[in-house]
Every structure is written in structure tokens, then in C-alpha cells.
Image (tube, rainbow, N blue to C red):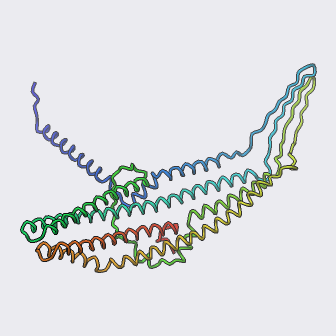
Amino acid sequence: MHTKITLNHIFMIVGICLLTSTIGQISSAVSNEEGRTSLEIAIETALRENPQLNVIREKVKVARARIDGIALLGNPALETKFLGGPHAEQTLELTKAFQLGGQRGHRIQIAKSQLEKADVELAKVSQSVTKSVKIAFYELLLVQEKLKLAKEIVQYNKQMRDIAEIRFETGDISVTQANLANIHLQSALREATTLESEVQLAQLTLNGLMGAPFEAARVAVGELRERVSPDTHQKLTLDPLKTQALAHRNDLKSLQLNAQLTESELRLAKAVNIPDLSVGALAEHSVGERAFGVKFSIPLPLFNRNRAEINATKAQQQVDTAQINNAEKQIVREVTAAFLSLSTTQKMLTFYEGDTLKLLNENLKLTRTAYKLGEIELLEVILMQNEFIKTQFAYLDALAAYHKGVAELEAAVGTSLGSVP
């Protein structure tokens, strides 16, 4: 049996092949892009997947459930007694205790304060995770930039090693200078290997914060040289930053909520001192007789007036006040330290953002060219290259310190710098 292949069949086969190839290319592109992470994506993923935040979200659910679990009324108590014999009788008693002094309202207020405290705790940890992600991201970006530069240096050193070998074979340089070129190449290779390990450690830290697999290869996508708007920095002064921090820091809000919680607990402790009123209905049946009645009972607070709980809560109020005062002083110190640190970093960057790096780069190119032409010795190239690497690494360190300083100051203030009045 022979199958007739038409032109339509050929077009269909070609279309399927092209579609398969396109899908493969798309899949490959997606997989290649998976490890590339911007700062915004890193923060978004961390706030969604960070294990510590997920634990606190469950605590928020528990606090919310406790409010819903406070019943309007307690359960009544049913008691019955039966006595046999010629004068058999049976007693039925239904009793309900009523809490006085607004105890239920105080308990609801305590539960609401605990829920609000859980929400503030979630916001506080979210802010801490955001700061940690920013610092980890810029650390990864820093070592990536250093590794990129180190690999370029390795290539340059290979060229110098090759030139040195040629010049040695022609008798232009000594074996010592030829060996020096090879030693310098090995040093550059060691530096690149060390930076590769640092990249893996930085990836490990960022993956942990993002809740991603630790072994995932991740590339930070960003630009160290991109800085916050100069207008924003020019507006920043210390006093508004302190005021902003005292109004927005979530750890201070948490302590203030603790004080509110203690106040509600004191009110509850005083309300518990008021005895509960129990009201009951009685029904009694004996031979030929039936009787009904009402029962009231209230405990007499002669020996236990809940003084221990009241005194302990009053003492806790003093602790809360001291903690709030200490936290306010600590916040002011943190804001001051972060502000001074960022200001110092900005000043350090001005030393690199003039013509220094440009001149170093031009001098290095001229020195390498002169070495290739045999006009200078290898040692001069090594000295110039070492100075270039040292300055470039210092500049990258200063840029990373700047971004980390911004993250530290925003965390100290409790808001973004752009929202500071």
C-alpha cells in the first residue's frame, strides 16, 4: 500500500518542524532568563516566599481567630439530683454565670491589640527582609562586577605572558622577566577563582532570603553606578529623618502596642476583681409535690481580690514606658549613624567620579602598548595594572557601600527616603 504525499503534507511537516524549533528556542530563552533577577523582583519574591514572613502570617491568622473565638455568652450549667426511697425526690437546676465589670469587652480589646501587634510585627519583619535583600543583592552585584573585571585582567595577563615568551625567545628579556609574567598571570587566575567562590556565596545568601533553592544560579541585573536622585539627597537633613523614624518605625509601634495591651490587661484584672453573678432556675419534684424557684449566688471577695495580677500589670506598665524611651533613643542613634555613614560614602565617591579613573584607564592602555612595542619593562606594566585594579575595586566597593547605606538609612527611618518631608 503506497501513501500519496501531497504538497499540503509537505507544508504541514515543515510547519510542525518550525513550530517545534520555535518552542525549543522559547523554552531555552525562558530558562536562560530564569536566573536573571532585578532588585524589584528579588524584593517581591522575598516578601512572598520568605519562610520567616510566612510564619508571621500564620501568627496573624491565629490572632484574628482569637477575636472570633470570644463568645458572647458562656455556657450554662445543668445539674440534677435524684434521691430514691419512700420519699423519692428529684431536683433540676439550670445555672448561668454573668461576668460583671465589662470583662468580655476588655478581652476583645486585648485580642484586637494582639492582632494589631501581629500586623505590626509582619510589617517590621517585611521591612527587615527588604533591607537584607537589598544588601544581599548589591553584594552579589558587586562581586559580579569584580569578577568581570578580574576576568578581563586575566586575558590581559595572558597576552603579556605570550609577549614575554616571544621576547624571551628572541633574547630581548631575561628568564626572570618571563617568569614574572607567568607569576602575575597565576595571581590573576587565583583572584578570579576567589571571586567566583564569593559569587556563589552571595547567590546562596540572596536565594535564602528569596525562599528559592540554595543551589540556584542567580545573576543580579542592575547597575551599581545608578544612584538615588541628587535632589533627594540634597533635601535630606538629620532632624526630619529622626522625626520620620519616630513616627514610622514598626519596632517602636510594637512597643507602643505593648503598652496599650498592658493597659487593657490592667483593666481586665480590675474587672475580674468584681465577682461574677450566677443566676439559676430550680425545679424540684417529690412524691405528690412540685416546686419551682430562682437561685442567685455571688462569691465574696474576702481572701482573693486579684491583687497579685493587678500589681504585676502595674509593674509591667513601668517596664513598657522604659522600653519605649530606650527604643526612641536607640532609633535616634541608628538614624544618626546611618545618615553619617551615607554622607561619608557620598564624599568618598566624589574622589572617583572625577578624571581619576579615566586617567588611570588611559595610562594603563598606553603602558600596555608601550610594553608590546618593547619600550618599557614588564614591571612598569604590573605596577600600573595593580594601581588600576586597586582603584577600580575601591570604586566598586564605594558604590556598593553607597547602595547598602541607602538601604540602612531607609530601614532606620522606616520609610523610603523619597517620602521624608
Query: In the picture provided, is 385 more to the left or to the right than 373?
Result: right
Query: In the picture provided, is 32 more to the left or to the right than 307?
Result: left
Q: Quadrant of residue 165?
A: bottom left
Query: In the picture provided, is 421 more to the left or to the right than 15?
Result: right
The N terminus: image quadrant: top left
Q: Position of residue 194 (x, y in %)?
A: 31, 59
Compared to residue 378, the image places residue 212 above or below, namely above
Q: Nearer the viewer, residue 87 or 230?
A: 230
Q: Nearer the viewer, residue 177 or 72?
A: 177
Which residue lies most toward the left here? 170
Q: Position of residue 146 (x, y in %)?
A: 30, 65
Q: Position of residue 189 (x, y in %)?
A: 24, 61
Name the residue located 93 percent from the left edge and 19 percent from the top edge.
86
Name the residue located 54 percent from the left edge and 52 percent from the top edge.
56
Q: Quadrant of residue 43?
A: bottom left
Q: Position of residue 50 (x, y in %)?
A: 46, 52
**How many discs appear?**
0
Compared to residue 393, the image places residue 74 above or below, namely above
Q: Nearer the viewer, residue 407 or 31?
A: 407
Q: Quadrant of residue 10?
A: top left
Name the residue located 60 percent from the left edge and 63 percent from the top edge.
253
